[in-house]
Image (cartoon, rainbow, N blue to C red):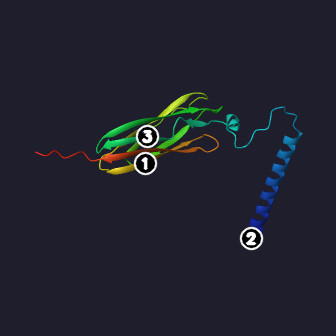
Amino acid sequence: MRIIYLTAFVLLFTTGACKQNATADNTNNASTNTEPAIDSDSSATTDKAGAVILFEEEKHDFGNVIQGEKVFYSFKFKNTGVADLIISTARGSCGCTVPTYPRRPIKPGAEGKIDVVFNSENLNGISQKTITVLTNSTPNGIKTLTIKSNVITPETKTQ
């Protein structure tokens, strides 16, 4: 009996989705809009989609860092969308990477930053960490920022 209900539900759902797409296609074809068609991969479509977060850069290399040193970097961004941008959370991939982010909505056209502190204590060699940022941005509300460094041990003083 469950199989019958499940099958009926799936058929009903897919039929409704197909009809909805057909209606949308007919509406687009009947339109007398004089604007040129925009490619779906074009960034021009994002300006109508809500909030859009655009980082100046998503990766930063600190270069050589002396073990135990704390280094800072600010990932700057802009809300290029038409709705308020809300950052739900920003989390480092480990306890040595601590981000700080704006808690208030970022208005369209406004800029902000995510500050990152990297603590190189107890690390050695090449280190790459990520910061995962969850937002209401479209088309994908998840951004991954990356920091990289080469942690070197301080030279031991000889007497």
Secondary structure of the residue carrying tag 3 is strand
Q: Please identify the quarter of the rendering in which residue 51 is found.
A: top right
- Asked if residue 121 lies left or right of residue 136, the reply is left
Front-most of residues 82 and 60: 60
**Relative to 32, does residue 150 appear above or below in the rendering?**
below
Q: Nearer the viewer, residue 11 or 46?
A: 46
The answer to whether mark 1 and mark 3 are in CB contact below 8 A is no
Which tag is nearer the camera, tag 1 or tag 3? Answer: 1
Q: Is residue 152 above or below residue 3?
A: above
Dot 1 or dot 3, earlier in sequence = 3
Mark pair 2, 1: CA separation = 47 Å
Q: Residue furthest left?
A: 159
**Amino acid type at mark 2:** Ile
Q: Is residue 31 above or below residue 122?
A: above
The image position of residue 61, as x and y in percent, is: 42, 42
- Say what secondary structure mark 2 lies in: helix
Q: Is residue 90 above or below residue 77?
A: below
- Residue bearing the label numbered 3: 99
- Mark 1: which secondary structure? strand
**Residue located at (43% from left, 40% from top):** 99
Q: Quickly name the residue at label 1.
A: 129
- Quadrant of the snapshot with the N terminus: bottom right
Question: Where is mark 2, residue-wise?
Answer: 3
Mark with earlier residue (3, 2): 2
Which amino acid lies under the numbered mark 1 shown in the image of this protein? Lys
Q: Give, as a three-letter code, the residue at label 3.
A: Pro
Q: Nearer the viewer, residue 42 or 137?
A: 42
